[in-house]
Amino acid sequence: MPESFLVIIPTYNEIENIKDMIEAVLDNEHGFHLLIIDDNSPDGTAMEVKNLQQNYPERLHILERSGKLGLGTAYILGFRWGLEQGYDIICEMDCDFSHNPEDIIRHKENILGGADVSIGSRYIPGGDVKGWDNRRVFLSKGASLYTRLVTRLPVKDTTSGFVAYRRVVLETMDLSKIIFKGYAFQIQMKYACLKLGFKLVEIPITFIDRVKGTSKLSSNIISEAILGVLKIWWSGFTTEYRSNAV
């Protein structure tokens, strides 16, 4: 029986990208399913998703929230929903085409090839970043180096938000212990996977800065990541990431 594959995309004011992204993920022979988690976008993103559901009645889904509640909580909601629906592989990605939808199949191949967690990486051979100035690239690479030094994560792109998980990973993890909302969420998820003994494998991707819409990056998200790394490191001594249900 083929592996069922769910893609999760959180949205807030992505009306300029949402239709193209939905079609890019679903208009192919791979049979992916897509869950949009919208944080009450005032620009009509959720309504556009609902309009498109008639084209993909069994494969396009949406969960709506009352407002901007954070990237991390959106993904946790999506993970729980995906597990309840029985998906074998669950992938997270952005809506702004900074992550190439064509790379989703490479994540699936990586999981089927033995990885428990497949990470789209800008900073391994073959990876690249387009549209960022040198300062932003330096800051991003520096953040990943800082994270690796503190946490000993064997991952070059620790803040990558283009990640696929084997079902057992999310079932084993106590998702209530993942407390961060921004970039630190991505780091803590990878760290929890490491502590639980799962195999993390990076694949090279080309990250392209958004062309349409507005970036959600803020100083609060950056500061959370910097301070959060120390909290994540300490959690390795004080937190049991394994779910009691396992």
Image: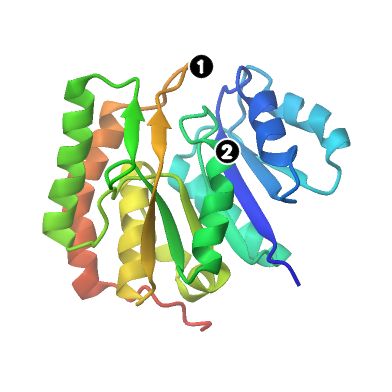
In three-dimensional space, the C-alpha distance between marks 2 and 1, rounded to whole angstroms, equals 18 Å
Q: Residue at x 24, y 62 (%)?
A: 154
Mark 2 Cα within 10 Å, few/some/many (few <14, many 20+)? some
Residue 77 visible to the viewer: no
Please tell me which residue lies in front, 240 or 214.
Answer: 214
Helix, strand or loop at disc 2? helix
Q: Are the residues flagged by discs 2 and 1 in contact, CB closer than 8 Å?
A: no
Instruction: Please state the horizontal and vertical placement of residue 175, each as a whole percent of the image.
Output: 46, 64
Q: Is residue 11 left or right of residue 198?
A: right
The image's mark for residue 74 is none
Q: Which residue is mark 1?
A: 213
Residue type at tag 1: Gly
Instruction: Please state the horizontal and vertical placement of residue 153, each as a whole percent of the image.
Output: 23, 61
Is residue 117 depicted above or below 159 in this figure? Answer: below
Is residue 161 depicted above or below 12 in this figure? Answer: below
Mark 1 Cα within 10 Å, few/some/many (few <14, many 20+)? some
Is residue 199 depicted above or below 149 in this figure? Answer: below
Q: Which residue is mark 2?
A: 101
Helix, strand or loop at disc 1? loop
Classify residue 26 by image quadrant. Answer: top right
Please tell me which residue lies in front, 227 or 203.
Answer: 203
Which circle's residue, 2 or 1, is located before the other in the chain?
2
Q: Residue at x 16, y 31 (%)?
A: 138
Instruction: Please state the horizontal and vertical placement of residue 189, each as a whole percent of the image.
Output: 38, 59
Q: Residue at x 20, y 57 (%)?
A: 231
Residue 191 visible to the viewer: yes
Instruction: Please state the horizontal and vertical placement of residue 232, each as a whole percent of the image.
Output: 24, 59
